[in-house]
Image (cartoon, rainbow, N blue to C red):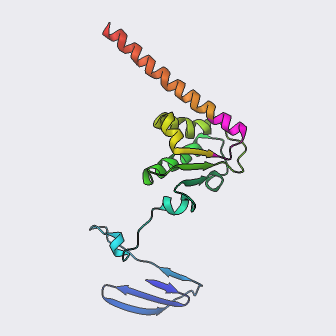
Amino acid sequence: MINSHGGHLRAIGGSVKPEKACIPYIGTFVEFVISGNKAIDLDKALWGFETISHVQFSFQEESSDDLLLRLRDEESNFGNRPTGLKIRNLILNMMQQMPKNRIVVDFDEINLISSSFADEVFGKLASKLGVLNFSRILILKNTTNLVASLIDKAIAQRMAQDYAQINTSEDSQEIADF
């Protein structure tokens, strides 16, 4: 179905019917349904044009291969774990869809975050990825000294917690072996 200005064109099966649209508007709207019953080669369906992912379209910087995550464009409050979970999941999705790209997390206009937000995003990411991979994949940009210190502290505490859990399980194994 194609709606453009006051015109309406509907194609169903092999027939095409022009109609007068009920509500005229400026622009063109195209609606179509693709059957999910069989595989579709989107590149072929789009006549050789390459498909791009939402992540690539929304976050890739024009001047580099880096993905830019402007936190102020995603949320307005950085003081709780639920917001941190949302941002961490967004970062993980970006990493999954574009695994060869670094992610620049831009803190422009964000002067304060909570410790729980810092832990939920950066502490847990550092724990999951390891500090070296974390540092290789994520670049933190425009952080205030306070925000940077809260993130550093969250990562240090999360890594210390992980280390303590490893040592506790090793001690338990030694006792069991004894």
| Residue nearest the viewer, comparing 132 with 22 | 132
Residue 27 is inside the magenta segment = no
Q: Is residue 94 left or right of residue 62?
A: left
Q: Residue at x 36, y 9 (%)?
A: 175
* Percent coordinates x, y for residue 110 in the rendering: 70, 47
Residue at x-position 44% and y-position 78%? 31
Quick one: 44 or 174, which is closer to the camera?
44
Count of numbered badges drawn on the protein: 0
Q: Quadrant of the N terminus?
A: bottom left
Please state, as top left, top right, bottom left or bottom right, where the C terminus lies in the image.
top left
State the extent of the magenta-drawn residues as a range.
141-151
Across and down, in percent, residue 53 comes to: 45, 62
Q: Is residue 115 above or below residue 6?
A: above
As drawn, 111 above or below 46:
above
In the rendered image, which quarter is residue 149 located in?
Answer: top right
Q: Position of residue 129 (x, y in %)?
A: 47, 37
Residue 148 in magenta? yes
* In this view, 15 is above or below 160: below
